Amino acid sequence: MSFPLTRRTVLAATAAGAAAPLALDGPATAGAAKTYTLTVLGTSDTHGNVYNWDYYRDAEYDDSAHNDVGVAKLAALVNQIRDEPGTTTLVLDAGDTIQGTPLATYYAKQEPITETGEKHPMAKAMNVLHYDAVTLGNHEFNYGLPLLNLWIRQLGFPALAANAVNVATGRPAFRPFVIKKLKLQGRELKVGILGLTNPGVAIWDRANVEGKLRFEDLVETAAKYVPIMRRNGADLVIISAHGGDSGTSSYGPELPNENPSALIAEKVPGIDAILFGHAHAEVAQRFVTNTATGEQVLLSEPSKWGQRLTRMDFELAKEKGRWVVKSKRSATLNTNTVTEDPDVLRAVRRQHAKTVAYVNQVVARSTEELSAAESRYKDTPILDYINKVQTDTVTAALAGTEWEGTKVLSIAAPFSRTAVFPQGDVKIKDVAGLYIYDNTLEAVVLTGAEVKAYLEYSAKYFVTLAPGAPVDPATISDPAVPDYNYDVISGIDYDIDISRPVGDRIVIDIDPAARFVVAVNNYRRSGGGNFPGIVKTQVYNAQQEIRQLLIDWAQAKGVIDPADFFVPNWRLVRAGVPVF
């Protein structure tokens, strides 16, 4: 049969029929071989979500599209499909599992499982759901290899990452693939599942993996292992890849492609389907033609946080002693159509409650409401709060060193558009909502010329708008540049002229030869975002988590008052005229 070769087809799952069997093309003709159906269910980028809960708002999760989140929602939908008469299923995950919510952070930082021996909440939840395999995502490496390896041991199913190689031995650091033996109406089917993690780990978690692991090209790794799985009897080959399908990378050419899932399908023969993640996109169904065989490879990505479940259905027949795929298709199913699975909730209830209690602890009182809603395009006190804490921390640490007395600048990004410090009590959840990543603080030395180049690169975040052209904050940024890859710098005055071309926007009075100590998070300093000049030896690296520094500073002061830290030092302009 033929399949559409559309770049991307997003299918809407209806509330009434979200979990209904997917229709296949036409009735079997007389004399045709009997067909069998295999259903593969896929999740990805669950990011520590178990309950349908927003820890930053201390309320049930909701957004403008009324999505739901969490493994408990996914489990309910998975079990609904498993209960369909005659259904044979596999359940896979494409990675980024143990990072992303205060729940995940709590059991990595406040009560780390490596110290308590407690089972990680994501291991508990996923074991209840009964996955068949999970692929390691880049965020699995955020908390170091000891915690990752313990979490893997706590799972009741394999964790895969074929392209992660042990530097010392040259052998795979994790299990590369698994071949699952299934029964389709009494007939055995072997399904090979290959896991591929993201090579960006080498940059983003350099401190945790450098000298220990290397991350090989996903296309080359698939080309190596797919034939091995076929030789080991795999009738069907599915890749679970933590890399998007755009073919682009957020970093430079020093590492393999970050988002190569479509390239894998195109270049590596012998693949039936690819479940992929990392991009947080909803790709219900996409077909890519393999250039070597002409076969169509099915791809799907189930959004993020447990909002969607990918359903792939394969119609197979046994012809001349071998399994043949007669048709295949996929859809993404909305988890807001089901009620949370009570067994998953029960398994994680105590840990969820402990996290809720922790994030609702008061750390300080704010003299006024501070919002991050405008931090992308205006200098705001709440972002200056981050820079103040980073500057103070690094300045104190430099005392008695050769860099004592050197001017300290600080870099911060507007991670969240919804973060707010309310007037009055500020809680841990408010600080965590402002600084949503588990970054640590570092510092390097930059020249004035390097500072200007850094700012020019950051300023590509904005679209070009001629003087007098209408300005809409909702469309002022380039959609190809995420908010977390736009940085502001405190400690020096500058303008960003968005009427000028990218690369020639920064208006600044700075000595190109001057030297500054620059406070920066470990993600950026390691090369995340491919910013120029920042990947160099640190003059400060005490492995202090920035979110905790923000909490500690607030607790020590007792009061968060913009008068203590808000120093407007940058603005958006057009031909010298402020935009806002």
Image: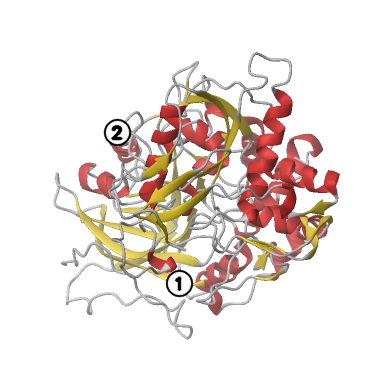
- Residue corresponding to mark 1: 333
Pick whichever of labels 2 and 1 is earlier in the sequence: 2
Residue under the image location 33 percent in, 38 percent down:
257
Q: Mark 2: few, some, or many residues within 10 Å (few <14, many ≥20)? A: some
Discs 2, 1 touching: Cβ within 8 Å: no
Residue 547 placement (x, y as % from top left): 69, 45
Q: Quadrant of residue 317?
A: bottom left
Instruction: Give amino acid for label 1.
Output: Leu
Residue 529 placement (x, y as % from top left): 43, 40
Residue 377 placement (x, y as % from top left): 48, 58
Residue under the image location 63 percent in, 70 percent down:
61
- Residue corresponding to mark 2: 220
Q: Mark 1: few, some, or many residues within 10 Å (few <14, many ≥20)? A: many
Could you say whether the residue bearing mark 1 is in a helix, strand or loop? strand
- Numbered marks: total: 2
Q: Is residue 241 left or right of residue 135?
A: left
Separation of residues labelled 2 and 1 (CA atoms): 32 Å
